[in-house]
Amino acid sequence: WLLRAEAAAIPWIKDFPTKPILFSTSPPLVSHWLAWRLAKHFSLPWVADFRDPLVANFGRRSSLGRLMDAPIEKQVVRRASAILMNTEAAAEELRSRYPTHAAKIDALPNGYDPEDGFGPLPRPHRPYRLWFHGGSIYRNRYPERLFDSLWRLTESGKLASDWRIRLVGALEDQSLLQRPSFIALASKQLIDINTNVLPKADALRAAAEADGSMVFDHYHSGGPNLAIPAKSFDCIRAERPILAFTSPGAPLDRLLSLCGVASVRIYEEDPPTVIDEKILAFAQLPPEPTKPSEAFRNLHSAPEQTRKLASLLNRLASKHGMLRS
């Protein structure tokens, strides 16, 4: 793909009416490699956008990939005119690794399009509260804690059986389905997992009609998570209580503090007794919608993100003499 893409891009750039700014985004990484070759060939400014951190990314498991990630990242940071990360935490970590290039590293967070019309819907009549999780489950550590706590609370009588959990999406490790707490909850029809991928419209409708949402941060043992699960923005815009499994100070933890929607956060170091207390507190939250805060909208809505990106591109154009006075 690289060589074919380069062969197609070279005449297109030659015929371009003005000198362009190159913009590459990953994954896949090959897009940065192509942008580097074109930037070098034409002496063009280049913005390298990392939607996910590269080094120590929990989702990159290939031994060869992990071996190559650090040198590739180093070359991109050295050669690109500007670097974008998707959270301030990821940007700060990258600045700490490359202090001489810190000035060109910035954060452009993920977010949402306010014109897509998504928001809370009336809750269907049902004799129980429904807590919904839509999307892939990449690690079992957090769901295991949720299931274990719900079973303890149900068996002890502290939590009435007037709730249901629905999880829809790919399940990375099927051993979760063999966990005793899951089997016990499923036998009482308190939990349902559908590992088929729903059409996006159906998944969003399910989230909008639920009494509450759940989100599991991308836990990994190598250090704090630097990203925000994309489904978090759907949870916030559903405007009903959110139960999140994360770490103190993680980007997801900060996002939930900012957004203004009711949430209960269960942290990595919380012992079982604390997890039980927090889930009981979550169960008591009223399901009425709460509008996200103005601060959340200003940081994560598509128009604000577009303005920030346009400002960056204008600065690069001015620096490289691409803007007329």
Image (cartoon, rainbow, N blue to C red):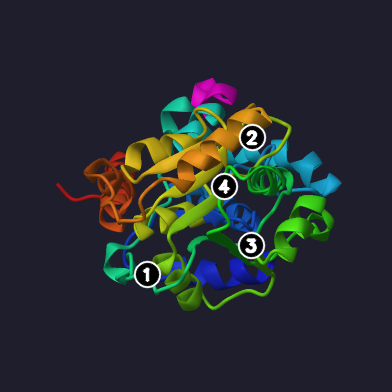
* SS category of the residue bearing label 1: loop
Residue marked by disc 3: 190
At x 58%, y 57%, the residue is 161
Q: Which amino acid does the dot numbered 1 rest on?
A: Arg
The image quarter in which residue 245 lies = top right
Residue marked by disc 4: 159
Q: State the separation of the CA atoms marked 2 and 3.
A: 49 Å
Instruction: Return the x and y of residue 243 as percentages of the image width and height.
Output: 50, 46
Q: How many marks?
A: 4
- 98 magenta-colored: yes
Frontmost of labels 2 and 3 is 3
At x 53%, y 28%, the residue is 248
Q: Nearer the viewer, residue 49 or 206?
A: 206
Q: State the separation of the CA atoms marked 4 and 2.
A: 51 Å
Mark drawn on residue 123? 1
Q: Which residues are magenta?
A: 95-101
At x 32%, y 67%, the residue is 17
Q: In the rendered view, tell whether residue 179 sits above or below residue 132.
A: above
Residue marked by disc 2: 74
Q: Name the dominant secondary structure of the magenta segment.
A: helix
Q: Which amino acid does the dot numbered 3 rest on?
A: Leu
Q: State the separation of the CA atoms marked 4 and 3.
A: 12 Å
Instruction: Return the x and y of residue 190 as percentages of the image width and height.
Output: 64, 62
